[in-house]
């Protein structure tokens, strides 16, 4: 009787261990593997929303190329596709994966927090389900966004990653009728020994300046240098010129993920076409920067002087 009990106990233990194992990959076709690399879950406790950022790798170990247009999946909650997403994005940079090569899948999805059960990838062709929980989900929330009051500050940091902002090296310039603010630096840091997905920030820049299309009588701005521009008197009948807020176009890097123990600094530049600085104004803090994160539900705002 003791032997029977022992065998039954061992059987239950074996089944328990099998049930606890985490399946981190599915087979798309023979020798083509879709493997979940990293997932970050961000809760906004004020708006009661949840964002999942995810990264996966598609490995083509076959003898022929793999067309990523064949990749078919949806994000579901325990195979229920109705998750009422309020925001989503997906990027697969390669349309074709050569033999013995790989590519990544990056994306995010946000939705109201309705006590979801098990978010993950559902592959309708094979009816496979790959749970995000297989990747040991990194968790964060909006209370971890740090306040700033300096030119250099850490906006977010936990045990896995950090986001640092440096506005101390910014420079304003004017040429060809366009004002540019350059070298705003956002640095993303991976402190782990594996690939991690990055919830990147969206930088927006505003210049409180002059609409130069309203001052065509002052000269041809398209061929004007900064030194020539500063010599212009924009006053009207002794009154200071009117300045307004103008939103610029931001260019720079977008970081989707980082390799182990790596960091990347994004140099952001803002371009304001047909907008100039009013250099006669004593207030030099004419640039306003907004660093927006929909997932954290936060906007970090600070001023920059020219």
Image (cartoon, rainbow, N blue to C red):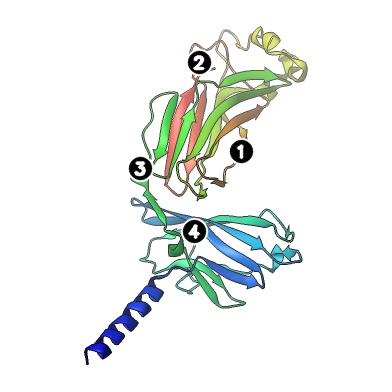
Q: Which residue is drawn at 75% across and 66% down?
A: 63
- Mark 3 to mark 2 CA distance (whole Å): 31 Å
Q: Does the residue at mark 3 contact the one at mark 2 (Cβ under 8 Å)? A: no
Residue 91 visible somewhere in the drawing: no
User: In terms of sequence position, does the residue under pointer 1 or pointer 2 come before the other?
Assistant: 1
Q: What separation in Å lies between label 4 and label 3 (alpha carbons)? A: 22 Å
**Disc 4: which residue:** 86
* Residue linked to disc 3: 144
Residue 227 appearing in the image: yes
**Residue beneath disc 2:** 284
Q: Please tell me whether mark 3 or mark 2 is closer to you in this view.
A: 3
Q: Where is residue 291 in the image (x, y as percent from the top left)?
A: 49, 37
Q: Do the residues labelled 2 and 4 touch (CB within 8 Å)?
A: no
Q: Residue at x 28, y 82 (%)?
A: 9
Q: Looking at the image, which residue sits at the far bottom?
A: 1
Question: What residue is shown with label 1?
Answer: 253
Task: Give the image quarter of residue 181.
Answer: top right
At x 54%, y 17%, the residue is 306
- What element does badge 1 sit on? loop
Rate crowding at label 4 as few (under 14), some (14 to 19) or many (20 or more) other CA atoms within 10 Å: few
For residue 90, above or below residue 26: above
Marks 4 and 1, how far apart in space?
25 Å
Which marked residue is nearer to the observer: mark 1 or mark 2? 1
């Amino acid at each position: 009787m003791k032997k029977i009990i022992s065998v039954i106990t061992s059987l239950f233990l074996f089944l328990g261990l099998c049930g606890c194992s985490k399946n981190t990959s599915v087979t798309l076709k023979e020798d083509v593997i879709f493997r979940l690399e990293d997932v970050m879950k961000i809760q906004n406790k004020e708006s009661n929303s949840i964002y999942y950022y995810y990264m996966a790798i598609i490995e083509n170990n076959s003898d022929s190329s793999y067309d990523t247009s064949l990749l078919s999946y949806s994000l579901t909650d325990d195979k229920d596709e109705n998750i009422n997403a309020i925001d989503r994005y997906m990027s697969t940079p390669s349309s074709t994966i050569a033999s013995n090569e790989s590519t990544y899948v990056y994306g995010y999805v946000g939705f109201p927090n309705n006590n979801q059960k098990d978010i993950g990838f559902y592959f309708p062709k094979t009816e496979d389900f790959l749970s995000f929980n297989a990747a040991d989900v990194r968790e964060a929330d909006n209370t971890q966004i740090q306040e700033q009051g300096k030119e250099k500050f850490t906006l977010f940091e936990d045990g896995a990653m950090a986001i640092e902002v440096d506005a101390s090296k910014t420079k304003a310039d004017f040429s060809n009728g366009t004002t540019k603010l350059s070298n705003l630096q956002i640095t993303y840091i991976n402190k782990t020994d594996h690939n991690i997905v990055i919830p990147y920030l969206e930088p927006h820049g505003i210049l409180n300046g002059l609409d130069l299309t309203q001052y065509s009588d002052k000269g041809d701005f398209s061929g004007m240098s900064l030194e020539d521009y500063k010599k212009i008197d924009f006053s009207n009948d002794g009154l200071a010129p009117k300045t307004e807020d103008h939103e610029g176009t931001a260019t720079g890097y977008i970081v989707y993920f980082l390799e182990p123990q790596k960091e990347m600094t994004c140099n952001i530049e803002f371009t304001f076409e047909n907008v100039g600085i009013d250099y006669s104004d004593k207030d030099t803090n004419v640039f306003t920067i907004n660093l927006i994160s929909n997932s954290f539900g936060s906007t970090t705002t600070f001023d920059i002087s020219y």
